[in-house]
Amino acid sequence: MEKLKTLEPSVDAVALPRWEIFVYLALSFGSHLYSFYEVHQVSRAYERALHSKGELEDGFTFWGYKKDPTDFEWSFWIEWGRQSVLWTLLGHVVVSQLVRATLPKFRIWFLTGYGLLACWLVLGLGGLAIILLHVVVSFAVAQFRLPFLCWLCSLLLLYSLHIPSLEEVQKKWYSTEDEYYLLLFSLAVSCLRCISFCLENCWQQSYPKCSQAFMWMLAYLFYYPGFHNGPVLNFNEFSTQMQKKEQRVKKNDIATLMLGIARIFLWWWLAESMIHFMYMHAIHNNEAILESVTFWTLGGLALAQVLFFYVKYLVLFGIPTMIIRLDGIEPPKLPRCVSAMYSFTGLWRNFDVGLHRWLIRYIYIPLGGSQHGLPGMMFSTAMAFGFVFYWHGGHGYLFIWAVLNWLGIIVENGVKRVLFIPSVWNIIERSMSPRMRRRAYAALASFSTAMLILSNLVFLGGIDVGKFYWNRIFVQGWPWATFTALGFLYCYAQIGMEFDRAYR
Protein backbone atom coordinates (compact mmCIF):
# COMPACT_ATOMS: atom_id res chain seq x y z
CA MET A 1 0.00 0.00 0.00
CA GLU A 2 2.80 2.44 0.82
CA LYS A 3 4.43 1.72 -2.54
CA LEU A 4 1.08 2.38 -4.24
CA LYS A 5 0.60 5.68 -2.40
CA THR A 6 4.06 6.99 -3.24
CA LEU A 7 4.11 5.95 -6.88
CA GLU A 8 0.56 6.69 -8.01
CA PRO A 9 0.86 10.51 -8.00
CA SER A 10 3.97 10.39 -10.19
CA VAL A 11 1.91 9.05 -13.09
CA ASP A 12 -0.49 11.96 -13.59
CA ALA A 13 1.55 14.73 -11.93
CA VAL A 14 4.04 14.94 -14.79
CA ALA A 15 3.87 18.11 -16.86
CA LEU A 16 3.34 17.72 -20.60
CA PRO A 17 4.45 20.27 -23.24
CA ARG A 18 2.16 23.28 -23.40
CA TRP A 19 1.43 22.77 -27.09
CA GLU A 20 0.21 19.24 -26.33
CA ILE A 21 -2.11 20.42 -23.56
CA PHE A 22 -3.40 23.11 -25.92
CA VAL A 23 -4.20 20.42 -28.54
CA TYR A 24 -6.07 18.35 -25.94
CA LEU A 25 -7.95 21.44 -24.77
CA ALA A 26 -8.87 22.46 -28.33
CA LEU A 27 -10.08 18.95 -29.20
CA SER A 28 -12.05 18.68 -25.95
CA PHE A 29 -13.67 22.08 -26.27
CA GLY A 30 -14.27 21.68 -30.00
CA SER A 31 -15.88 18.24 -29.62
CA HIS A 32 -18.20 19.59 -26.94
CA LEU A 33 -19.26 22.54 -29.08
CA TYR A 34 -19.74 20.55 -32.29
CA SER A 35 -21.65 17.71 -30.64
CA PHE A 36 -23.87 20.22 -28.82
CA TYR A 37 -24.48 21.97 -32.15
CA GLU A 38 -25.61 18.63 -33.61
CA VAL A 39 -27.96 18.08 -30.65
CA HIS A 40 -29.34 21.57 -31.14
CA GLN A 41 -30.00 20.89 -34.82
CA VAL A 42 -31.82 17.63 -34.05
CA SER A 43 -33.78 19.38 -31.29
CA ARG A 44 -34.96 22.04 -33.73
CA ALA A 45 -35.82 19.43 -36.38
CA TYR A 46 -38.04 17.44 -34.01
CA GLU A 47 -39.36 20.38 -31.96
CA ARG A 48 -42.89 20.24 -33.36
CA ALA A 49 -43.11 16.46 -33.01
CA LEU A 50 -41.94 16.55 -29.40
CA HIS A 51 -44.23 19.48 -28.58
CA SER A 52 -47.25 17.69 -30.05
CA LYS A 53 -46.58 14.75 -27.74
CA GLY A 54 -46.58 17.09 -24.73
CA GLU A 55 -42.85 16.68 -24.00
CA LEU A 56 -42.06 20.37 -24.51
CA GLU A 57 -43.61 23.48 -23.04
CA ASP A 58 -43.52 27.22 -23.51
CA GLY A 59 -40.84 28.33 -21.09
CA PHE A 60 -38.93 31.59 -20.99
CA THR A 61 -38.49 33.47 -24.25
CA PHE A 62 -35.14 32.19 -25.45
CA TRP A 63 -35.36 33.42 -29.04
CA GLY A 64 -38.69 31.63 -29.38
CA TYR A 65 -37.43 28.17 -28.30
CA LYS A 66 -39.53 25.69 -26.37
CA LYS A 67 -38.39 24.25 -23.06
CA ASP A 68 -37.68 20.60 -22.26
CA PRO A 69 -39.23 20.08 -18.78
CA THR A 70 -38.86 16.28 -18.68
CA ASP A 71 -36.03 16.25 -16.14
CA PHE A 72 -38.26 15.64 -13.12
CA GLU A 73 -35.73 16.66 -10.48
CA TRP A 74 -34.98 20.07 -12.02
CA SER A 75 -38.62 20.93 -12.67
CA PHE A 76 -39.60 19.69 -9.20
CA TRP A 77 -37.05 21.75 -7.25
CA ILE A 78 -37.44 24.87 -9.37
CA GLU A 79 -41.19 24.82 -8.77
CA TRP A 80 -40.75 24.22 -5.03
CA GLY A 81 -38.14 26.95 -4.88
CA ARG A 82 -40.61 29.42 -6.32
CA GLN A 83 -43.43 28.28 -4.06
CA SER A 84 -41.82 28.15 -0.64
CA VAL A 85 -38.35 26.66 -0.19
CA LEU A 86 -36.40 29.73 -1.34
CA TRP A 87 -38.46 31.89 0.99
CA THR A 88 -37.96 29.62 3.99
CA LEU A 89 -34.22 29.50 3.24
CA LEU A 90 -34.20 33.30 3.13
CA GLY A 91 -35.97 33.29 6.49
CA HIS A 92 -33.21 31.07 7.88
CA VAL A 93 -30.57 33.57 6.71
CA VAL A 94 -32.40 36.46 8.39
CA VAL A 95 -32.90 34.59 11.68
CA SER A 96 -29.36 33.23 11.71
CA GLN A 97 -27.67 36.56 11.06
CA LEU A 98 -29.86 38.50 13.51
CA VAL A 99 -29.27 36.02 16.31
CA ARG A 100 -25.59 35.72 15.42
CA ALA A 101 -25.24 39.48 15.86
CA THR A 102 -27.33 39.82 19.03
CA LEU A 103 -27.60 36.51 20.92
CA PRO A 104 -24.83 34.27 19.54
CA LYS A 105 -24.88 31.87 22.51
CA PHE A 106 -28.46 30.90 21.73
CA ARG A 107 -28.15 30.76 17.94
CA ILE A 108 -28.30 26.96 17.72
CA TRP A 109 -31.63 26.88 19.57
CA PHE A 110 -33.15 29.68 17.52
CA LEU A 111 -32.12 27.83 14.34
CA THR A 112 -33.66 24.61 15.69
CA GLY A 113 -36.92 26.40 16.38
CA TYR A 114 -36.88 27.99 12.94
CA GLY A 115 -36.17 24.61 11.30
CA LEU A 116 -39.18 23.06 13.03
CA LEU A 117 -41.36 26.01 12.02
CA ALA A 118 -40.18 25.90 8.39
CA CYS A 119 -40.76 22.14 8.23
CA TRP A 120 -44.33 22.64 9.51
CA LEU A 121 -45.00 25.46 7.03
CA VAL A 122 -43.66 23.55 4.01
CA LEU A 123 -44.57 19.92 4.82
CA GLY A 124 -47.59 20.47 7.02
CA LEU A 125 -48.37 19.07 10.45
CA GLY A 126 -48.46 15.49 9.18
CA GLY A 127 -45.05 15.81 7.54
CA LEU A 128 -43.53 17.34 10.67
CA ALA A 129 -45.09 14.59 12.80
CA ILE A 130 -43.68 11.72 10.70
CA ILE A 131 -40.19 13.24 10.67
CA LEU A 132 -40.33 13.73 14.46
CA LEU A 133 -41.46 10.11 14.80
CA HIS A 134 -38.38 8.97 12.86
CA VAL A 135 -36.21 11.15 15.09
CA VAL A 136 -37.69 9.83 18.35
CA VAL A 137 -37.46 6.17 17.26
CA SER A 138 -33.86 6.61 16.07
CA PHE A 139 -32.88 8.41 19.28
CA ALA A 140 -34.47 5.73 21.47
CA VAL A 141 -32.60 2.95 19.65
CA ALA A 142 -29.34 4.98 19.83
CA GLN A 143 -29.51 4.87 23.64
CA PHE A 144 -28.51 1.19 23.51
CA ARG A 145 -25.25 2.33 21.85
CA LEU A 146 -25.15 -0.71 19.57
CA PRO A 147 -24.29 0.21 15.95
CA PHE A 148 -26.00 -2.93 14.63
CA LEU A 149 -29.33 -1.90 16.22
CA CYS A 150 -28.95 1.64 14.85
CA TRP A 151 -28.42 0.33 11.36
CA LEU A 152 -31.32 -2.12 11.63
CA CYS A 153 -33.63 0.64 12.83
CA SER A 154 -32.55 3.02 10.06
CA LEU A 155 -32.95 0.42 7.31
CA LEU A 156 -36.44 -0.41 8.58
CA LEU A 157 -37.36 3.28 8.62
CA LEU A 158 -36.09 3.59 5.05
CA TYR A 159 -38.13 0.54 4.09
CA SER A 160 -41.23 2.15 5.60
CA LEU A 161 -40.98 4.95 3.01
CA HIS A 162 -42.06 2.47 0.32
CA ILE A 163 -44.81 0.51 2.11
CA PRO A 164 -47.89 1.02 -0.11
CA SER A 165 -50.37 1.39 2.76
CA LEU A 166 -48.24 4.06 4.46
CA GLU A 167 -47.72 5.82 1.13
CA GLU A 168 -51.48 6.05 0.65
CA VAL A 169 -51.96 7.51 4.13
CA GLN A 170 -49.26 10.12 3.62
CA LYS A 171 -50.52 11.08 0.15
CA LYS A 172 -53.93 11.87 1.66
CA TRP A 173 -52.29 14.63 3.71
CA TYR A 174 -51.59 16.61 0.54
CA SER A 175 -53.50 17.90 -2.45
CA THR A 176 -50.72 17.13 -4.99
CA GLU A 177 -48.18 14.35 -5.48
CA ASP A 178 -45.34 16.88 -5.53
CA GLU A 179 -46.07 17.72 -1.90
CA TYR A 180 -45.80 14.04 -1.00
CA TYR A 181 -42.53 13.70 -2.95
CA LEU A 182 -41.06 16.63 -1.04
CA LEU A 183 -41.85 14.79 2.20
CA LEU A 184 -40.29 11.62 0.77
CA PHE A 185 -37.07 13.40 -0.21
CA SER A 186 -36.89 15.14 3.16
CA LEU A 187 -37.32 11.84 5.01
CA ALA A 188 -34.61 10.18 2.91
CA VAL A 189 -32.08 12.93 3.69
CA SER A 190 -33.16 12.94 7.35
CA CYS A 191 -32.41 9.21 7.48
CA LEU A 192 -28.76 9.91 6.63
CA ARG A 193 -28.60 12.44 9.44
CA CYS A 194 -30.26 10.04 11.89
CA ILE A 195 -27.67 7.37 11.08
CA SER A 196 -24.85 9.90 11.48
CA PHE A 197 -26.09 11.08 14.88
CA CYS A 198 -26.80 7.56 16.19
CA LEU A 199 -23.43 6.12 15.18
CA GLU A 200 -21.53 9.12 16.56
CA ASN A 201 -23.52 8.65 19.79
CA CYS A 202 -22.45 4.97 19.88
CA TRP A 203 -18.78 5.81 19.34
CA GLN A 204 -18.27 8.65 21.80
CA GLN A 205 -16.65 7.77 25.11
CA SER A 206 -18.37 10.35 27.33
CA TYR A 207 -22.13 10.46 27.14
CA PRO A 208 -24.05 13.74 27.62
CA LYS A 209 -27.38 13.90 29.40
CA CYS A 210 -30.24 12.32 27.48
CA SER A 211 -32.14 15.60 27.20
CA GLN A 212 -29.06 17.49 25.99
CA ALA A 213 -28.28 14.80 23.40
CA PHE A 214 -31.86 14.86 22.11
CA MET A 215 -31.77 18.64 21.73
CA TRP A 216 -28.56 18.36 19.70
CA MET A 217 -30.20 15.71 17.53
CA LEU A 218 -33.12 18.05 16.86
CA ALA A 219 -30.69 20.89 16.10
CA TYR A 220 -28.81 18.68 13.63
CA LEU A 221 -31.87 17.13 11.99
CA PHE A 222 -33.75 20.40 11.57
CA TYR A 223 -30.83 22.57 10.50
CA TYR A 224 -32.74 23.94 7.55
CA PRO A 225 -30.27 24.72 4.71
CA GLY A 226 -29.71 21.04 3.92
CA PHE A 227 -33.00 19.73 5.24
CA HIS A 228 -34.82 18.85 2.00
CA ASN A 229 -32.07 17.81 -0.40
CA GLY A 230 -28.62 18.13 1.21
CA PRO A 231 -25.70 18.48 0.93
CA VAL A 232 -24.99 15.95 3.66
CA LEU A 233 -23.04 17.24 6.67
CA ASN A 234 -21.96 14.64 9.25
CA PHE A 235 -22.99 15.20 12.87
CA ASN A 236 -19.42 15.38 14.19
CA GLU A 237 -18.63 18.16 11.70
CA PHE A 238 -21.87 20.02 12.43
CA SER A 239 -21.62 19.89 16.22
CA THR A 240 -17.92 20.80 16.33
CA GLN A 241 -18.36 23.86 14.13
CA MET A 242 -21.60 24.97 15.79
CA GLN A 243 -19.89 25.01 19.18
CA LYS A 244 -17.05 27.22 18.03
CA LYS A 245 -16.82 30.64 19.65
CA GLU A 246 -19.25 32.89 17.82
CA GLN A 247 -18.18 36.04 16.07
CA ARG A 248 -20.25 39.02 15.07
CA VAL A 249 -21.34 39.51 11.49
CA LYS A 250 -18.34 40.32 9.32
CA LYS A 251 -18.40 43.20 6.86
CA ASN A 252 -17.55 40.94 3.96
CA ASP A 253 -20.50 38.59 4.60
CA ILE A 254 -22.79 40.72 2.42
CA ALA A 255 -20.22 40.81 -0.40
CA THR A 256 -19.81 37.03 -0.13
CA LEU A 257 -23.57 36.59 -0.25
CA MET A 258 -23.92 38.81 -3.34
CA LEU A 259 -21.13 36.96 -5.13
CA GLY A 260 -22.71 33.61 -4.26
CA ILE A 261 -26.11 34.75 -5.52
CA ALA A 262 -24.54 35.94 -8.79
CA ARG A 263 -22.83 32.58 -9.34
CA ILE A 264 -26.01 30.63 -8.60
CA PHE A 265 -27.97 32.83 -11.00
CA LEU A 266 -25.34 32.17 -13.68
CA TRP A 267 -25.56 28.41 -13.12
CA TRP A 268 -29.39 28.56 -13.19
CA TRP A 269 -29.28 30.54 -16.43
CA LEU A 270 -26.88 27.99 -17.96
CA ALA A 271 -29.11 25.06 -16.95
CA GLU A 272 -32.21 26.77 -18.34
CA SER A 273 -30.35 27.61 -21.56
CA MET A 274 -29.37 23.96 -21.99
CA ILE A 275 -32.96 22.72 -21.80
CA HIS A 276 -34.13 25.45 -24.18
CA PHE A 277 -31.44 24.85 -26.82
CA MET A 278 -31.04 21.07 -26.45
CA TYR A 279 -33.93 18.68 -25.77
CA MET A 280 -31.67 15.85 -24.55
CA HIS A 281 -34.12 14.49 -21.96
CA ALA A 282 -37.11 14.45 -24.30
CA ILE A 283 -35.04 12.81 -27.09
CA HIS A 284 -33.79 10.14 -24.69
CA ASN A 285 -37.44 9.35 -23.96
CA ASN A 286 -38.21 8.94 -27.67
CA GLU A 287 -36.73 5.73 -29.08
CA ALA A 288 -37.53 6.52 -32.72
CA ILE A 289 -35.66 9.83 -32.67
CA LEU A 290 -32.78 8.36 -30.69
CA GLU A 291 -32.25 5.59 -33.24
CA SER A 292 -32.14 8.06 -36.13
CA VAL A 293 -29.38 10.39 -34.86
CA THR A 294 -25.74 10.35 -35.93
CA PHE A 295 -22.84 9.25 -33.72
CA TRP A 296 -21.87 12.89 -33.16
CA THR A 297 -25.38 13.72 -32.01
CA LEU A 298 -25.44 10.63 -29.82
CA GLY A 299 -22.20 11.69 -28.14
CA GLY A 300 -23.56 15.20 -27.71
CA LEU A 301 -26.73 13.86 -26.07
CA ALA A 302 -24.68 11.86 -23.57
CA LEU A 303 -22.42 14.82 -22.78
CA ALA A 304 -25.36 17.22 -22.52
CA GLN A 305 -27.24 14.98 -20.12
CA VAL A 306 -24.35 14.38 -17.70
CA LEU A 307 -23.26 18.04 -17.87
CA PHE A 308 -26.82 19.19 -17.19
CA PHE A 309 -26.83 16.91 -14.14
CA TYR A 310 -23.64 18.63 -12.98
CA VAL A 311 -24.94 22.17 -13.52
CA LYS A 312 -28.23 21.23 -11.88
CA TYR A 313 -26.43 20.23 -8.68
CA LEU A 314 -24.33 23.36 -8.73
CA VAL A 315 -27.66 25.15 -8.24
CA LEU A 316 -29.33 22.65 -5.91
CA PHE A 317 -26.27 22.34 -3.66
CA GLY A 318 -24.97 25.87 -4.30
CA ILE A 319 -27.86 27.62 -2.54
CA PRO A 320 -27.68 25.68 0.77
CA THR A 321 -23.86 25.64 0.62
CA MET A 322 -23.79 29.44 0.44
CA ILE A 323 -26.15 29.69 3.42
CA ILE A 324 -24.22 27.11 5.46
CA ARG A 325 -21.01 29.07 4.87
CA LEU A 326 -22.74 32.28 6.02
CA ASP A 327 -23.51 30.44 9.27
CA GLY A 328 -19.79 29.96 9.86
CA ILE A 329 -19.81 26.26 8.94
CA GLU A 330 -17.57 24.78 6.26
CA PRO A 331 -19.86 22.79 3.92
CA PRO A 332 -18.77 19.99 1.55
CA LYS A 333 -17.26 21.26 -1.68
CA LEU A 334 -19.52 21.73 -4.67
CA PRO A 335 -19.42 19.08 -7.42
CA ARG A 336 -16.49 19.09 -9.80
CA CYS A 337 -17.16 19.31 -13.55
CA VAL A 338 -17.86 15.84 -14.92
CA SER A 339 -15.95 16.60 -18.14
CA ALA A 340 -12.79 16.70 -16.00
CA MET A 341 -13.51 13.32 -14.35
CA TYR A 342 -11.52 10.38 -15.58
CA SER A 343 -12.15 7.65 -13.01
CA PHE A 344 -14.95 6.14 -10.96
CA THR A 345 -12.98 6.83 -7.79
CA GLY A 346 -12.55 10.48 -8.72
CA LEU A 347 -16.25 10.89 -9.48
CA TRP A 348 -17.32 9.58 -6.08
CA ARG A 349 -14.73 11.67 -4.26
CA ASN A 350 -15.48 14.92 -6.06
CA PHE A 351 -19.12 15.02 -7.11
CA ASP A 352 -21.32 14.56 -4.03
CA VAL A 353 -18.52 15.19 -1.52
CA GLY A 354 -20.85 15.14 1.48
CA LEU A 355 -22.33 11.74 0.59
CA HIS A 356 -18.82 10.38 -0.08
CA ARG A 357 -17.64 11.48 3.38
CA TRP A 358 -20.75 9.93 4.91
CA LEU A 359 -20.20 6.58 3.16
CA ILE A 360 -16.52 6.50 4.09
CA ARG A 361 -17.08 7.34 7.77
CA TYR A 362 -20.12 5.19 8.49
CA ILE A 363 -19.80 2.21 6.13
CA TYR A 364 -16.40 1.85 4.46
CA ILE A 365 -14.09 2.43 7.44
CA PRO A 366 -16.19 0.54 10.06
CA LEU A 367 -16.22 -2.50 7.75
CA GLY A 368 -12.43 -2.44 7.45
CA GLY A 369 -11.96 -0.79 4.07
CA SER A 370 -8.59 -1.47 2.45
CA GLN A 371 -7.00 -2.55 5.74
CA HIS A 372 -7.91 -6.16 4.91
CA GLY A 373 -6.47 -6.07 1.40
CA LEU A 374 -8.37 -6.27 -1.88
CA PRO A 375 -11.11 -8.65 -0.60
CA GLY A 376 -11.84 -6.32 2.33
CA MET A 377 -11.93 -3.31 0.05
CA MET A 378 -14.26 -5.13 -2.36
CA PHE A 379 -16.65 -6.08 0.46
CA SER A 380 -16.66 -2.62 2.09
CA THR A 381 -17.20 -0.92 -1.25
CA ALA A 382 -19.99 -3.35 -2.13
CA MET A 383 -21.78 -2.56 1.14
CA ALA A 384 -21.43 1.18 0.49
CA PHE A 385 -22.91 0.89 -3.00
CA GLY A 386 -25.56 -1.50 -1.71
CA PHE A 387 -26.71 1.16 0.72
CA VAL A 388 -26.67 3.87 -1.97
CA PHE A 389 -28.82 1.62 -4.18
CA TYR A 390 -31.26 0.96 -1.31
CA TRP A 391 -31.35 4.61 -0.20
CA HIS A 392 -32.17 5.84 -3.71
CA GLY A 393 -35.23 3.59 -3.84
CA GLY A 394 -34.00 0.10 -4.73
CA HIS A 395 -35.18 0.12 -8.37
CA GLY A 396 -33.77 -2.33 -10.91
CA TYR A 397 -31.88 0.22 -12.98
CA LEU A 398 -30.27 1.58 -9.79
CA PHE A 399 -28.95 -1.91 -9.04
CA ILE A 400 -27.29 -2.05 -12.46
CA TRP A 401 -25.87 1.45 -11.90
CA ALA A 402 -24.52 0.51 -8.45
CA VAL A 403 -22.93 -2.69 -9.78
CA LEU A 404 -21.28 -0.83 -12.67
CA ASN A 405 -19.82 1.72 -10.26
CA TRP A 406 -18.64 -1.00 -7.87
CA LEU A 407 -17.00 -2.92 -10.72
CA GLY A 408 -15.44 0.29 -12.03
CA ILE A 409 -13.80 1.10 -8.69
CA ILE A 410 -12.67 -2.51 -8.17
CA VAL A 411 -11.12 -2.73 -11.65
CA GLU A 412 -9.40 0.66 -11.29
CA ASN A 413 -7.89 -0.29 -7.94
CA GLY A 414 -6.98 -3.76 -9.18
CA VAL A 415 -5.15 -2.38 -12.24
CA LYS A 416 -3.27 0.15 -10.07
CA ARG A 417 -2.22 -2.56 -7.63
CA VAL A 418 -0.86 -4.67 -10.49
CA LEU A 419 0.95 -1.76 -12.16
CA PHE A 420 2.56 -0.65 -8.90
CA ILE A 421 3.92 -4.05 -7.95
CA PRO A 422 7.66 -3.24 -7.60
CA SER A 423 8.79 -5.68 -10.31
CA VAL A 424 6.12 -4.51 -12.78
CA TRP A 425 6.73 -0.85 -11.98
CA ASN A 426 10.49 -1.25 -12.52
CA ILE A 427 9.81 -2.59 -16.02
CA ILE A 428 7.47 0.32 -16.76
CA GLU A 429 10.03 2.85 -15.51
CA ARG A 430 12.79 1.39 -17.69
CA SER A 431 10.66 1.15 -20.83
CA MET A 432 8.64 4.41 -20.64
CA SER A 433 9.51 8.02 -19.90
CA PRO A 434 7.43 9.90 -17.27
CA ARG A 435 5.51 11.70 -20.02
CA MET A 436 4.77 8.46 -21.84
CA ARG A 437 3.57 6.94 -18.57
CA ARG A 438 1.09 9.80 -18.20
CA ARG A 439 -0.12 9.30 -21.77
CA ALA A 440 -0.53 5.57 -21.17
CA TYR A 441 -2.40 6.31 -17.95
CA ALA A 442 -4.75 8.66 -19.85
CA ALA A 443 -5.34 5.94 -22.46
CA LEU A 444 -6.41 3.54 -19.70
CA ALA A 445 -8.51 6.31 -18.16
CA SER A 446 -10.40 6.77 -21.44
CA PHE A 447 -11.85 3.25 -21.08
CA SER A 448 -12.75 4.00 -17.47
CA THR A 449 -14.38 7.30 -18.48
CA ALA A 450 -16.43 5.55 -21.18
CA MET A 451 -17.83 3.11 -18.63
CA LEU A 452 -18.34 5.98 -16.18
CA ILE A 453 -20.47 7.90 -18.68
CA LEU A 454 -22.38 4.71 -19.55
CA SER A 455 -23.18 4.03 -15.88
CA ASN A 456 -24.37 7.61 -15.43
CA LEU A 457 -26.62 7.27 -18.47
CA VAL A 458 -28.17 4.21 -16.82
CA PHE A 459 -28.72 6.29 -13.65
CA LEU A 460 -30.21 9.23 -15.55
CA GLY A 461 -32.10 7.46 -18.33
CA GLY A 462 -32.61 3.86 -17.28
CA ILE A 463 -31.39 0.46 -18.45
CA ASP A 464 -32.78 0.79 -21.99
CA VAL A 465 -30.85 4.01 -22.62
CA GLY A 466 -27.65 2.39 -21.33
CA LYS A 467 -28.15 -0.66 -23.58
CA PHE A 468 -28.82 1.59 -26.57
CA TYR A 469 -25.56 3.51 -26.11
CA TRP A 470 -23.60 0.30 -25.63
CA ASN A 471 -24.99 -1.20 -28.84
CA ARG A 472 -24.55 1.95 -30.94
CA ILE A 473 -21.04 2.90 -29.80
CA PHE A 474 -19.37 -0.40 -28.92
CA VAL A 475 -21.19 -2.94 -31.11
CA GLN A 476 -22.62 -1.26 -34.22
CA GLY A 477 -20.01 1.48 -34.19
CA TRP A 478 -16.99 -0.83 -33.91
CA PRO A 479 -14.23 0.06 -34.62
CA TRP A 480 -14.43 3.65 -35.90
CA ALA A 481 -17.06 5.13 -33.60
CA THR A 482 -15.61 3.26 -30.63
CA PHE A 483 -12.04 4.46 -31.10
CA THR A 484 -13.16 7.99 -32.02
CA ALA A 485 -15.11 8.21 -28.76
CA LEU A 486 -12.16 6.79 -26.79
CA GLY A 487 -9.85 9.27 -28.50
CA PHE A 488 -11.87 12.24 -27.36
CA LEU A 489 -12.22 10.73 -23.89
CA TYR A 490 -8.42 10.44 -23.84
CA CYS A 491 -8.26 14.22 -24.39
CA TYR A 492 -10.80 14.79 -21.60
CA ALA A 493 -8.71 12.63 -19.27
CA GLN A 494 -5.57 14.64 -20.06
CA ILE A 495 -7.41 17.89 -19.27
CA GLY A 496 -8.63 16.38 -15.99
CA MET A 497 -5.10 15.32 -15.08
CA GLU A 498 -3.77 18.76 -15.91
CA PHE A 499 -6.44 20.27 -13.67
CA ASP A 500 -5.41 17.94 -10.85
CA ARG A 501 -1.73 18.70 -11.41
CA ALA A 502 -2.33 22.46 -11.31
CA TYR A 503 -4.30 22.33 -8.05
CA ARG A 504 -2.41 19.51 -6.32
Image (tube, helix red, strand yellow):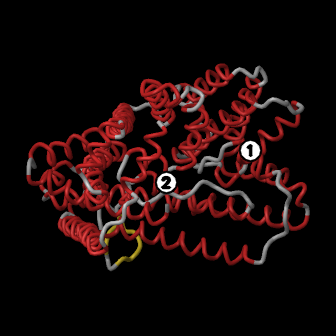
Question: Which callout, 2 or 1, points at the residue further toward the start of the chain?
Answer: 2
Q: In the rendered image, which residue does mark 1 sit on?
A: 220
Horizontal placement of 317 versus 12: left or right?
Answer: right
Query: Type of residue at label 2?
Result: Phe
Horizontal placement of 361 versus 76: left or right?
Answer: right
Q: Dot 2, crowdedness within 10 Å: few (<14), some or many (≥20)?
A: some
C-alpha separation, residue under disc 2 versus residue under disc 1: 25 Å
Write the residue at 41% across / 73% down: 60
Q: Dot 1, crowdedness within 10 Å: few (<14), some or many (≥20)?
A: many
Q: Secondary structure at mark 2?
A: helix
Write the residue at 36% across / 67% down: 274
Residue 58 position, x and y percent, is: 37, 68
Labelled disc at residue 76:
2
Write the residue at 56% across / 43% down: 185
Query: Type of residue at label 1?
Result: Tyr
Vertical placement of residue 23 versus 352, above or below: below
Q: Nearer the viewer, residue 286 or 299?
A: 299
Residue 248 position, x and y percent, is: 85, 69
Q: Secondary structure at mark 1?
A: helix
Residue 282 position, x and y percent, is: 29, 55
Q: Is residue 198 visible?
A: yes
Q: Is residue 397 visible?
A: no
Find residue 423 and report its image quarter.
top left
Horizontal placement of 413 versus 210: left or right?
Answer: left
